[in-house]
Image (spheres, coloured by chain):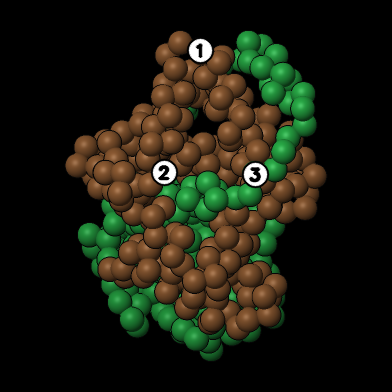
């Protein structure tokens, strides 16, 4: 599925998590689930704590919800379409969004799964390309200058808009936008725009 | 052919879950039509996952795993995905918000050529509405106090800076004044998301400006 170890340093470990998900999906394997839990629950908790203070105060509730969804949906996991950690991250993102809206007493007919439906392509060629994109991004992420990585972390892990990040870091909005654009170039994302 | 896309900021905020609900719906609708932005979206999701992998792990309570394990067998299987049969030309997400057909909605007329219907998304900061412009009809010339996102669902329209077809996504703010005009051959239906009321610059409608309110619900 992914490229060589050289362009995908996390690949080997990720294979292990993919196998866990497959075992859970196929055989309801509790030992595999326990391994996955030990690795991912602390990451999901960190992600929950990074969100709005309201959602952060329910961080372990979110961990439970996410890990149970992982158990329930594991049979839908397809390692050809996404890596295990991408798959788990999207569940965590969706659950955190829904939890936040629930806590806010947001009355809406729309759920996070409607906003981010499964956009994986059925096209095998595109899937291969997608996986290549993904391992490249992971590889390049460590090379981003701090000032760019910091903004992306605030947007993605803390769920802040560019304006909120600008206010927090006391930077002009234009600076935040241009640092994000520079990061996109460096990660070789969306360069055609 | 889709040729107008959300910008880098919107695509990032959308993928990250950092965008309000109504604008997020608008971006998701665009993704339905645009493989290029779907690919960008997949890349940004992978970017999010890469950042997630790098988070410093936070220890969870000792008994949390047992608590989750104990629940595994008692949780109902998740409902299978609602595969609503889409009415022709209308994305499922819009159907969910409309809960009926276009013609049965509660449309309000603006002049003889345009009607508008506000849909409830639950987003208190952004108005989400459908605009129906008759073939050849125009929305009076206006500018924006905040930001306006537009997505074409059916038909097509033009304004001072371009021509837009189904799936095209536009963002306008106070720097832009425009007069969207539907093409002559068919009616045009758009989604419009506003974070502040528009301001009509056309003298015939200007008197209405002080009374315009954001209809976010």
What residue sits 43% from the left and 36% below the top? A13
x and y percent of residue A10 in the render?
Answer: 41, 43
Classify residue A67 as left or right of residue B44: right
What residue sits 19% from the left and 42% below the top? A125
x and y percent of residue B139 in the render?
Answer: 44, 73
Q: Is residue B191 above or below residue A22?
A: below
Q: Which mark is residue B57?
A: 3
Frontmost residue, A77 versus B194: A77
Disc 1: which residue: A28
Chain letter belonging to callout 3: B
User: Which image quadrant for residue B65?
Assistant: top right
x and y percent of residue B103 in the render?
Answer: 45, 46
Classify residue A156 as left or right of residue B11: right
Element under disc 3: loop
Q: Is residue A111 above or below residue B181?
A: above
Chain shaded green: B
Mark 3 or mark 1: which is in front? 3
x and y percent of residue A192 in the render?
Answer: 28, 68
Residue B101 seen in the figure: no
- Dot 3 crowding, Cα within 10 Å, few <14, some 14–19, many 20+: some
User: Which image quadrant for residue A63?
Assistant: top right
Q: Residue furthest bottom?
A: B203
Say whether mark 2 and mark 3 are on the same chain.
no
- Dot 1 crowding, Cα within 10 Å, few <14, some 14–19, many 20+: some
Disc 2: which residue: A10
The picture's colour for chain A is brown
Q: Is residue B110 above or below residue B58?
A: below
């Amino acid at each position: 599925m992914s490229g060589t170890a050289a362009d995908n340093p996390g690949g080997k470990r990720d294979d292990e998590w993919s196998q866990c998900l497959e075992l859970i999906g196929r055989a309801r394997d509790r030992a595999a689930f326990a391994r996955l839990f030990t690795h991912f629950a602390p990451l999901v908790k960190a992600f929950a704590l990074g969100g709005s203070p309201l959602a952060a105060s329910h961080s372990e509730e979110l961990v439970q919800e996410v890990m149970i969804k992982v158990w329930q949906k594991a049979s839908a996991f397809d390692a050809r379409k996404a890596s295990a950690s991408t798959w788990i991250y999207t569940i965590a993102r969706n659950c955190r969004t829904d939890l936040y809206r629930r806590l806010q007493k947001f009355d809406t007919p729309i759920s996070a799964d409607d906003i981010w439906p499964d956009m994986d392509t059925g096209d095998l060629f595109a899937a291969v390309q997608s996986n290549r994109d993904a391992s490249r991004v992971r590889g390049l992420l460590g090379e981003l200058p701090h000032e760019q990585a910091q903004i992306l972390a605030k947007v993605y892990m803390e769920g802040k808009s560019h304006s909120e990040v600008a206010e927090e870091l006391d930077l002009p909005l234009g600076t935040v936008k241009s640092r994000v654009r520079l990061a996109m170039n460096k990660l070789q994302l969306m360069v055609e725009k | 052919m889709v040729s107008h896309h959300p910008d880098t900021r919107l695509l990032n905020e959308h993928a990250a879950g950092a965008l309000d609900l109504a604008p997020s719906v608008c971006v998701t609708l665009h993704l339905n039509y645009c493989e290029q932005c779907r690919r960008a979206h997949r890349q940004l999701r992978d970017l999010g996952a890469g950042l997630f992998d790098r988070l410093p792990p936070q220890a969870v309570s000792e008994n949390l795993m047992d608590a989750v394990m104990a629940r595994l067998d008692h949780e109902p299987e998740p409902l299978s995905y609602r595969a609503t049969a889409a009415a022709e030309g209308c994305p499922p997400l819009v159907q969910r918000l409309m809960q009926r057909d276009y013609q049965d909605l509660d449309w309000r007329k603006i002049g003889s050529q345009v009607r508008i219907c506000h849909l409830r998304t639950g987003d208190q900061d952004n108005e989400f509405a459908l605009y129906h412009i008759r073939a050849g009809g125009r929305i009076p010339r206006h500018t924006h106090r905040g930001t306006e996102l537009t997505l074409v669902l059916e038909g097509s329209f033009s304004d001072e800076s371009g021509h837009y077809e189904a799936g095209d996504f536009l963002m306008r703010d106070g720097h832009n004044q425009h007069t969207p005009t539907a093409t002559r051959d068919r009616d045009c239906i758009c989604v419009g998301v506003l974070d502040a009321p528009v301001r009509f610059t056309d003298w015939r409608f200007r008197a209405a400006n002080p009374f315009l309110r954001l209809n976010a619900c």
